[in-house]
Amino acid sequence: MHDVTPAKAGVQTRLRKTCGLLLAFTALVFISAPLRAGEAQPIVIKFSHVAAPQAHKSRAAEHFKMLAERYTEGRVRIELYPNSQLYKDKEELEALQLGAVQMLAPSVSKFGPLGIRAFEVFDLPYIFAGYEELSKVTHGEIGRELLDRLKSKGLIGLAYWNNGFKILSAHSPLYGPDDVLGLKMRIQASKVIEAQMWALGALPQALAFSEAYQALSSGVVDGTENTPANMYNQNMYEVQKHATLTNHGYLGYAVISNDTFWSGLPADIRASLERAIAETTPVADRFALEENAAALEAMRQSGKTTFHEPTPAERAAWRAALLPVHDEMASRVGRDLIDRIYAATGHKVPAR
Ligand code: LMR
């Protein structure tokens, strides 16, 4: 999946050259034109992401832009690039590392391929029983430590923004794990999500978000998992006849920047941007919560997808099939990290 083909290598080389020039140009601007309000060119921050323009991630990014430009009194201009219009999932991380863009908000599931496997702990099925347990991690010591690990990849983690809890969907009804057996399921590029699909007897296919709809509509894959908001905003519900409200796993974002770029910003600008991010986080989480509920309702109304609420016995069967993934993936994400999350959330440790 992450092999570098000659075509990709060519793209990467071109990207590196472009970025080298960009970095040199940015350095020149900083050195030759000290910023004075109203005189110098604003610092441009390109914020790229893969979600649809109407999605809550876009609306959160717009809110951040509004606050950031206000607090920096125009000394910073935030340019938003939603919908994978600049880069797809993997490319956007490379572009950030190389300095071609300055901010992203990828799903934390996408940090594994970058080499920071600990983030895949968020992908463990049922690791969080709900938002309260989740926020003990994202707003606590563990969340901070995880963001700090991004530094080893030249990145800086600035905040967590929620999307929500995932549901399963397919062309056929999914009452229990047996119904997923042999289905090709689109997933994000996370080894924990891959193991989760294997545990169900499904065939995981890691595809970029921008490719998910096409893969589902053409039958390249039979089903997927995602939040209601993502399923709705990408029109996946139009090509998935059935969905089951499993809420079996979490999908959320880390707002990140290039560490060298961020630490090179004038201190007062950096402080203003961090204030804008901190004030956007609760707004982003509210947008996500509201949008997931509204998306589910809109998809139900459309009549294109039939939504199934699992019975208690069905829920128990999903859990029994998926919980072994915690132990199976412990050596990848860290046994200690998993245990610290159990302790922080007070979540009942799944039977080992
Ligand atoms: C996905 O690939 O399914 C999500 O990470 C997309 C997103 O950014 O919400």
Image: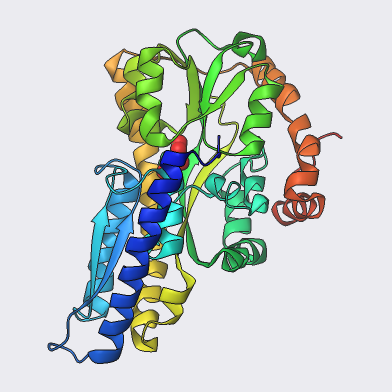
60 lies above or below 243: below
Residue 127: which quarter of the image?
A: top right
Residue beneath the point at 87% across and 35% down: 352
> Left or right: 322 with respect to 165?
right
Q: Quadrant of the N terminus?
A: top right
Residue 143: horizontal and vertical position, in percent? 61, 61
Q: How is the image coloured?
A: rainbow
Residue beneath the point at 38% across and 43% down: 88
The quadrant of the picture showing ligand 1 is top left
Can residue 105 be seen in the rendering of this structure?
A: no
Residue 15: horizontal and vertical position, in percent? 37, 56
Q: 221 or 74: nearer the eye? A: 221
Q: Give the farthest residue toward the left.
A: 38
60 lies above or below 196: below
Residue beneath the point at 58% across and 68% down: 151
Residue 308: horizontal and vertical position, in percent? 49, 15
Residue beneath the point at 28% across and 72% down: 68
